[in-house]
Amino acid sequence: MPGIRIAIGLLSASVIAWQLVLIQILSIAHWHHFAYMVLSVAMLGFGASGTLLALFRRKFLTGSGFLIPFLMLLTSLAMGSSVYLVENIVGGFDTWLLFIDNSEIVSLVLVYLLYTLPFLTGALAIGLILTRYAADIGRIYFYNMAGSGLGGLTGVLAMWLLFPEQLAALFALLPLVAAYFCSSARNRKRLAPVALLALLIAGAGIFNPPRINISQYKGLSGTMNLPGADVLSRESSPHGVIEAVKTDASRYAPGVSLNYTGVIPVEPMVFVNGNWSGPVKDPAGITDDILSHTTKQLPWLVRPAGNILITSTGTGRHAFHAIANNANHVTAVEPNPGLTGLTNRISHGFYGSSILDHTNVLVVHQSNRAWLNRSDGGYSHIILPTLDAFGGTSGLYALQEQYDLTLEAFAQMWDLLLDDGVISVTSWMDQPPRNTLRILATLAETAERNGIAEPERHIAAIRSWSTITFVLSRSPLTGESADRIREFCERNQFDPALLPGISMGERQQYNVTESSFFGYMDAIVKGDRTGFYNEYLFNVVPATDNRPFFSQFLKSGNIGDLITQYGRQTVPFIELGYLVLLLTGVQIFLAAVLFIVLPLFRLGWRGSKKSWTLIYFGGIGTGFMFVEINLIQQFIHYFGQPVYATATVLGILLISSGTGSYFSGHITRYRRGLEGLLLLLALLVGLLQVVLPLIIGISISMPAIVRIAASVLIIAPVGFLMGMPFPGGIRRLSGTDSAQVPWAWGINGCFSVISTVLAVWLALEWGYSTVLFTGALAYALAGAATLVISR
Amino acid sequence: MKTIVSALLFCFFLFPGLVTAQNDYQNERNRMVDRQIANRGISDEATLEAMRTVKRHLFVPAPRISQAYDDSPLPIGYGQTISQPYIVALMTELVEPRPGMRVLEIGTGSGYQAAVLAEIVDTVYTIEIVEQLGMTAAGVLEESGYSNVLVKLADGYHGWEEYAPFDAIVVTAAAEHIPPPLIQQLAPGGKMIIPVGSPYFTQNLMLVEKDGDSVRSRNILPVRFVPFTRAGQ
């Protein structure tokens, strides 16, 4: 018996850890949006396993002594081999080609199914253990949940030591050990060949891991195609895989003046998860920084440098520029310590020193929002990283939460400025204009919210052929600074785009663009902003903490108009991330029906009060996933990193809901226990909406241990109650209508799977508060159905 | 007679690719020019003729030959694409190519843009940084008889000093900066064209014109991209 408890603990740990590793692998190969695919893949595996268990319960139980360790070994095999099979046999898939090449859709489906396998076999083994050892359910649950929590922690910690592609194989060893613990001597002998095979595959994966196929359209892939490309260093951490690459041709001079005649130096470049992060600058070049010949010089023209705050410092490019402009002190905030560490090492190796070691530079390893929360302020300049990428990203970041670009973040920045301090941000010029207009709208609304009646007197912008830099000044722009800006533009053949008293002729002197662009800008700064928001084809309303998707511009109601303008083939590349989410949603829906619901028709749906079974188990499945997804998304703000957020939320939620399941028997003893529980849950979930932002706001800049403790306080009570409705409902069915139990499993699984994508979509369209509200509503609906139907 | 007709029909239905291949896709090219290019306002006769002449299907990867004349860009590997026919035509028209001109292209890619230009101007100098792409393009250009196209495998940043100045420069592999040497190698009154956008969404073209010491840029939107507001603000 102790063997089975250790086995289920190890297996549960492996499932959660592997899930986190998979999120990292997909982030490296693709972009952020596939993190939600992993959650739905896991849910699909669990849902399908429940259906299988319901269908073949008797057969499975008869052979469970052999089947449980066998399923664990299959889990090990699937975990150890699926990354290899996806990367080397299927060849992965490319997000960019999903809408170009039908074979990519086939590859996506294959990848989806291959990654579902470990969850299916693992969940089947867990389900079978819970069923077979029901008498010892208390202890079994404890090991199950404790294992899951430890798995989350181990998954994150291990990312500091090994690369994700190795970890996928390393965590395959856990189910192997688990199988050993729960096998009889006879079964150990019978299963030895399978165990040996699983061991060999895991070993091969650790020592000779498969190479992840990074999208050919990612920055790292393009750089590796350049002559002389050489990876100088590759490091792993929960923040992602960081790579420094040297080539004979990589240069950085965003939108440099067309009359610049100097040399643009070749520099090593740093990438995080295959995405370009920045160049490593030679500190010796500080006397003539190339950024001084770009629009990024604007903030230094408005007022002289004092104490500077740089957010998302990366490789320190903006810190370099600040020092070049005689900054007294630079606070360089970077959430990823590995990034600054590697930059320092490469810089010392190449140039003998590093800008991040400069006596005037203080590097702070914290999330930007945490620093904004705890800083004493007094900044003359706050410099943000450049928005978007040259040529655009086709909306690949539409699903990425960007808490540093919300109105709340800008309000904090405003408070930290000196009375004549400035916030500056540069954006690539995009067509159709979206980033440029949303950031301008954010600056204008920030000014207005701080009592500025005429934002146009506080905002300046200058434009090159490819970039535009904005400045928001706390005090009105002076005539002297406007003169300096005009003189700088003339010298570099840039055009002022926003300045007090600007004329249309000034705006189009050197770089002619659509004059409508200036009409949009004027409407935002001094015209009918709300009317413009409504009329514009894209959503350029500022992002908020409730809806922090700065790069999501699609108004779904305008898709028809966009197709008319751009053509059916082009439209997907306006907002690729959003459409991939929809595509994933369709696939998940089909898979859930195919693998969870359809098999149940073999049993037939008999019994009474079917509508209760549907509403109750659908409601609690939806409610659970909506709360889980919402918590993960909001905790990304809290922990500043998706993997930390996922590990914390999953760990606490699983342990607390497991404990709740264990105690669920107490609730169902009462006559109206379930109804009361569900209504209480709906109320608590609704309360989270108010409590969560408050707690996050108070404790975001506190040490990690305090934030983890606060997370337990927030999540555990709700999680505890969330664990009760499912076993409670099953118990009620078992007593009165046991033929419907398999359907209850299936419906719950199906709704849970679909809800993973639905929750993200709701957050994109209406914000997190709507997701939580809908989650609360789902629980309330299940409670009401119990009250009305199930008497 | 019946037998012959049946055999012809059999060939037509079973081997449509073969029948099309025999006419070298001329019909597809004519249709492409009429519907996708002339219809969208490209009127320069030399450009239209070049688009009708250059066998685009030779420049796309073999598995995508059937899509060669579609109204879209196609992947050619290494994160690169062969541009949508309309964009190629628009870029060609915008540099106002004429016989006697020397044109520099940065980013050979598939070689298709160079071939279109080579139909009109005297010499096209094209530079590709990705060795595999450059080699493949050079081979196709040579096999297609474009002896007036010179291909160099190098970093386009430095341009091609030896043959400078150029009447026009086409930067198909756009970088986030325009290398100063390219501006210097552009002849007075010369034009440089740069498509700006992500791989499958060319959002606009940047036309850079050099007039003495002054260098000005003009943002040109493909015809279908305006307006952006319902009210046409």
Image: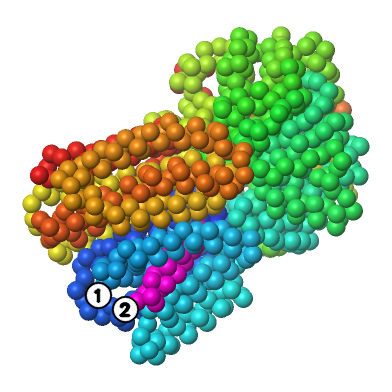
Label 1 sits on residue: A60
**Label 2 environment density (alpha carbons within 10 Å; few <14, some 14–19, many ≥20):** some
Tell me: residue B5, above or below residue B167. below
Instruction: Please give the name of the residue rendered at 50% of the width and 51% of the height, measured from the top-left corner.
Output: A648
Nearest to the observer: residue A709 or residue A354: A709
* Residue A259, horizontal then vertical, whole percent: 84, 32
In the shown orientation, is residue A732 left or right of residue A188?
Answer: left
Q: Which mark is residue A492?
A: none
Type of amino acid under label 1: Phe
Q: Main secondary structure of the magenta part?
A: helix
Position of A147 with respect to B175 (left or right) is left
Q: Is residue A264 above or below residue A100?
A: above
Whether residue A13 is in magenta: the answer is yes
Q: Secondary structure at mark 1?
A: helix
Range drawn in magenta: A1-22
Q: Position of residue A256 (x, y in %)?
A: 78, 35
Asked which quadrant contains residue A433, the reply is top right
Give the residue pinned by disc 2. Answer: A67
Tell me, yes or no, if residue A773 can be seen here. Answer: yes
Mark 2 in CB contact with mark 1 (< 8 angstroms): yes
| Nearer-the-camera pick, A25 or A141 | A141
Badge 1: few (under 14), some or many (20 or more) residues near its Cα, within 10 Å? many
Mark with earlier residue (2, 1): 1
